[in-house]
Image: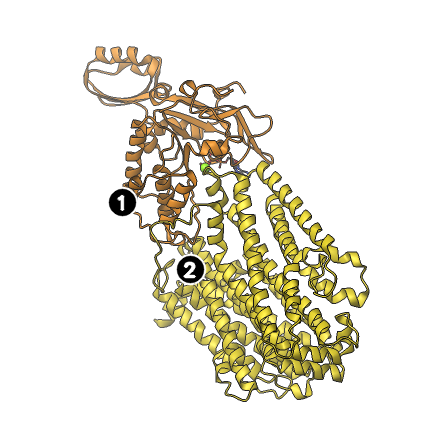
Chain colours: A orange, B yellow
């Protein structure tokens, strides 16, 4: 049943379903994260990201007709205790026992796992500038978030599940977190990172899965995803732009005297470039699509027919 | 200029009041209906049970003891103990405690709690003056207090035995206490760091007020000086001598005190930032104690404060009941209705009476600790809703272990509290020279007899938390049932099986009656069934949050 850990994915779900009453929160979700990867997990509000993570944590149970889910080769519902020794989780809205201090909370959570790296704990407290003697009820949202982050990062987990872990953190603290993500990656550990902060994802993630209405609509490395969209080209030309606007793969063409600006399909890049060279180029910028544009196209337009990765 | 500034301070006041009333209408209506609704019909009991002359005399005798003074009042009119004097001496203090609790809880809920949840920030950002939210909350709570008091005052006029002017005075006494504690709640909401702390501090003030009055009245009854009562808002109400020799001015003290505290709260509110506190923050340890590494030790940390409060309550009640027992036995013997109530007949000496009375005291101690057990178990339910249960289950902790840790810790602390209350009562009985020393072991036996029922009570609460989390409040009727059963079953000849309907009435607690081992084993069996069903379900179901 359980294959050897070397060739199992860190996370694998196939056709995952979870219904709350009439709401189909997950509607056949496929998600795969290879060991050692940092996987971004994106989607608009209510897409089902937190629901997925809660199923993976065994806090809620997938529907009876759902496809399988496995983490580190284990079943998230049946093997929850075993699994939780090997993973760490940080939610986006951390509630904590009001009458414990931050330091006590970190130690308590650590002792439930058995051990906690004291040196790392103290280093994290310092780096995140958290006063561990304050009671949880007096912490601001950002500081509660730090308590959960420190408790998770001080563990020796193989797999980290982060659900908007930096919500409420100031940019400085966000940078500290990003620094630790790099260390995690270096150590070959795996991360699933759900986030609305695209710059964070762009900076840290190897692969990205975009979900909508409980289904994966896009999966791949950032490079692969960029490929699906258009480059933005701006040029100053030596001659008239002529028939450039009519070329296949050129969109949103605007000319202003000797300056042109347009979007260009990846597939037509070669022909367009040679046409430009023939006219003569004084200056040229070609910017790859930002992750932001990629998302906006997924977040705002209705999901295209058959865009889901798996057959549902 | 000044008026413009103050209108701006209060901008949005009316909208806020409407908003508060609308959002909290259920809470407001429940207090408004429940307090008069429970009080007014039960007043009849003063007329009937103690309406005869011997009954009233016996009652006055009890109320003259220290126990009577501590749980009642200074005893004005005991020599001619009319229904009015009884209401003023015995009921008024509890009406005042109730209205004070209502005022504190409402006030803290509408102010500090709103701040804790960040909702006030949304309000504050809208076109609302700085003083408007607190003023609006004060207005709503004061209005609620006055409505409840009016309902009580006018409602009591339905009893012809109660002079109408004094009914109004009683309404005023309750309103004055309510307004004072509205002010206390508002001030504490400014001083404390959180809503919980504000409510805790306000209740501490109420506790001190109660203690001052109890000490002052006890000294006064014994011929000493009762000045301590005059430091307490609860004392002022009693000093109105309602239905005995009415004087209004002590009642007005409370109104003045409420007004002064309100002004203080508004001044304090103007001096602090939103979300900040005026009291300095107390820091705690940077590292967890070695003891804090199990779910059960965390549960204990969660319920510790409430355990101390509740067990202080049972110890106080237990200790206070001992001294009363001698005069009570005399009184019961002289009162045929009471003899019947306890199921005794004339030939019984002091011991059977003491035993019957002990059974009742131990039942009340058990109900108090049962209430602790239910609130402590329900803490797990509110922790589930706030995501704290998830916080533990995200770690390598199984659902069985977490639920079991809650059940075990709550059950053991409930029994421990019951034991402490029992020891206090036992000590009080042993040191009471009027009683035969043979009574003491019977008291110890009664305490032990309550254990199966308490375990079943906790098991029932656990079952509801795990299986019917929407209906956790169902535990309360089961807890209240034994008292109702005891009051009504003898009078209306209920069949014997009706006592099986709730854990604490299933087995007789009265020492001297044969020990009902079948009921006790039955209770443990029911507890085991409830707990196994709870675990079965909790293993299977989704967490609520
Ligand atoms: N316990 C629940 N009961 C009912 N509906 C739920 C529950 N939990 C989630 N949902 C619904 O499931 C859907 C997915 O919610 P989920 O929290 O997973 O979204 P999300 O992708 O995490 O969104 P966000 O970016 O806002 O965090 C939503 O429609 C939500 O309303
Ligand atoms: Mg979410």
Q: Secondary structure at mark 1?
A: helix
Task: Give the mark toward the camera: 1 or 2.
Answer: 1
Whether B233 is drawn above or below A184: the answer is below
**Residue B15, visible in the rendered structure:** no
Quadrant of the image where one finds ligand 2:
top left
- Residue B128, numbered circle: 2
Chain under callout 2: B
Q: Residues within 10 Å of mark 1 (few under 14, many from 20)?
A: few
Chain under callout 1: A
Asked whether disc 1 touches disc 2, contact meaning CB atoms under 8 Å apart, the reply is no
Left or right side of A180 for B53: right
Q: Residue at x 43, y 48 (%)?
A: A96
Q: Nearer the viewer, residue B301 or B384?
A: B301
Q: Position of residue B343 (x, y in %)?
A: 77, 69
**Number of numbered tags placed on the structure image:** 2
Whether B247 is drawn above or below B233: the answer is below
Q: Nearer the viewer, residue B339 or A239?
A: B339
Label 1 and label 2 in one chain: no
Q: Residue at x 57, y 81 (%)?
A: B238
Q: Position of residue A50 (x, y in %)?
A: 47, 35
Q: State the quadrant of the N terminus of chain B.
A: bottom left
**Residue B539, visible in the rendered structure:** yes
Residue at label 1? A126
- Residue B93, numbered circle: none
Q: Position of residue B306 (x, y in %)?
A: 51, 59
The alpha-carbon separation of the residues under discs 1 and 2 comes to 40 Å
Whether A175 is drawn above or below A190: the answer is below
């Amino acid at each position: 049943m359980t294959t050897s850990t070397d060739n199992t994915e860190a996370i694998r779900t196939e056709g995952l379903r979870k219904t709350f009453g009439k709401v189909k929160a997950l509607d056949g979700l496929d998600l795969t994260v290879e060991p050692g990867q940092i996987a971004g997990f994106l989607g608009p509000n209510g897409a089902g990201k937190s629901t997925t993570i809660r199923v993976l944590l065994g806090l809620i149970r997938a529907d009876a007709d759902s496809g399988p889910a496995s983490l580190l080769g284990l079943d998230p519902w049946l093997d929850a205790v075993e699994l939780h020794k090997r993973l760490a989780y940080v939610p986006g809205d951390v509630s904590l026992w009001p009458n414990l201090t931050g330091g006590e909370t970190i130690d308590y959570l650590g002792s439930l796992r058995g051990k906690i790296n004291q040196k790392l704990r103290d280093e994290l407290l310092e780096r995140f500038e958290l006063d561990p003697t304050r009671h949880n009820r007096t912490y601001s949202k950002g500081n509660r978030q730090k308590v959960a982050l420190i408790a998770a990062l001080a563990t020796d987990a193989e797999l980290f599940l982060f659900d908007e872990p930096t919500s409420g953190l100031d940019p400085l603290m966000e940078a500290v977190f990003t620094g630790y993500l790099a260390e995690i990656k270096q150590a070959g550990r795996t991360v699933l990172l759900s986030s609305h902060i695209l710059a964070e994802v762009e900076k840290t993630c190897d692969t990205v899965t975009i979900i909508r209405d409980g289904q994966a609509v896009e999966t791949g490395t950032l490079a692969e995803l960029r490929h699906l969209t258009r480059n933005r080209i701006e040029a100053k030309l030596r001659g008239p732009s002529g028939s450039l606007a009519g070329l296949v793969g050129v969109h949103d063409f605007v000319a202003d005297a000797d300056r042109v600006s347009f979007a260009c399909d990846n597939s037509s890049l070669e022909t367009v470039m040679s046409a430009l060279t023939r006219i003569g180029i004084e200056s040229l910028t070609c910017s790859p699509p930002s992750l932001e544009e990629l998302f906006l196209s997924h977040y705002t337009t209705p999901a295209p027919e058959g865009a889901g990765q798996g057959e549902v | 200029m000044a008026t413009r500034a103050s209108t701006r301070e209060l901008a949005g006041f009316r909208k806020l009041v409407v908003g508060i009333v609308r959002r909290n209408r259920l809470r407001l209506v429940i207090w408004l209906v429940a307090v008069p609704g429970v009080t007014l019909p039960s007043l009849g009991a003063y007329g009937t049970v103690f309406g005869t002359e011997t009954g009233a005399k016996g009652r006055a005798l009890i109320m003259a003891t220290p126990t009577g003074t501590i749980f009642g009042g200074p005893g004005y009119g005991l020599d001619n103990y009319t229904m009015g004097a009884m209401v003023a001496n015995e009921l008024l203090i509890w009406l005042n405690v109730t209205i004070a609790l209502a005022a504190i809880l409402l006030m803290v809920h509408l102010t500090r709690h709103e701040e804790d949840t960040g909702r006030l920030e949304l309000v504050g950002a809208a076109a609302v003056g700085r003083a408007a939210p607190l003023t609006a909350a004060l207005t709503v709570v004061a209005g609620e207090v006055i409505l409840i008091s009016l309902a009580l005052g006018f409602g009591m006029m339905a009893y012809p035995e109660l002079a109408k002017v004094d009914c109004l005075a009683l309404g005023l006494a309750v309103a004055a206490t309510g307004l004072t504690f509205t002010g206390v709640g508002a001030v504490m909401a400014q001083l404390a760091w959180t809503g919980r702390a504000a409510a805790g501090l306000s209740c501490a003030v109420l506790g001190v007020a109660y203690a001052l009055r109890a000490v002052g009245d006890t000294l006064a009854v014994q011929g000493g000086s009762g000045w301590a009562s005059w430091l307490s808002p609860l004392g002022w109400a009693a000093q109105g001598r309602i239905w005995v020799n009415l004087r209004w001015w002590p009642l007005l003290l409370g109104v003045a005190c409420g007004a002064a505290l309100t002004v203080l709260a508004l001044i304090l509110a103007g001096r602090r930032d939103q979300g900040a506190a005026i009291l300095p923050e107390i820091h705690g340890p940077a590292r967890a104690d070695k003891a804090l590494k199990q779910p059960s030790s965390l549960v204990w940390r969660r319920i510790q404060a409430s355990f101390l409060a509740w067990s202080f309550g049972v110890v106080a009640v237990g200790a206070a009941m001992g001294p009363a027992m001698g005069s009570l036995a005399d009184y019961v013997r002289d009162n045929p209705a009471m003899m019947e109530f306890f199921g005794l007949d004339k030939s019984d000496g002091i011991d059977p009476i003491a035993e019957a009375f002990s059974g009742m005291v131990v039942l009340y101690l058990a109900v108090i600790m049962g209430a602790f057990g239910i609130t402590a178990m329900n803490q797990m339910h509110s922790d589930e809703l706030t995501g704290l249960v998830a916080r533990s289950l995200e770690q390598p902790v199984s659902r069985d272990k977490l639920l079991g840790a809650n059940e075990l810790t709550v059950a053991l602390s409930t029994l421990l509290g019951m034991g402490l209350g029992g020891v206090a009562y036992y000590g009080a009985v042993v040191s009471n020279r009027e009683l035969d020393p043979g009574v003491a072991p019977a008291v110890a036996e009664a305490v032990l007899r309550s254990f199966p029922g308490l375990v079943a009570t906790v098991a029932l609460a656990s079952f509801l938390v795990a299986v019917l989390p929407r209906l956790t409040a169902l535990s309360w009727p089961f807890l209240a049932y034994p008292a109702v059963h005891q009051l009504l079953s003898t009078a209306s000849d209920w069949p014997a099986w009706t006592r099986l309907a709730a854990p604490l009435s299933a087995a007789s607690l009265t020492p001297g009656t044969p020990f009902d081992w079948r009921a006790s084993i039955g209770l443990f069996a029911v507890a085991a069934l409830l707990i196994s069903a709870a675990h079965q379900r909790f293993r299977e179901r989704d967490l609520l949050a």
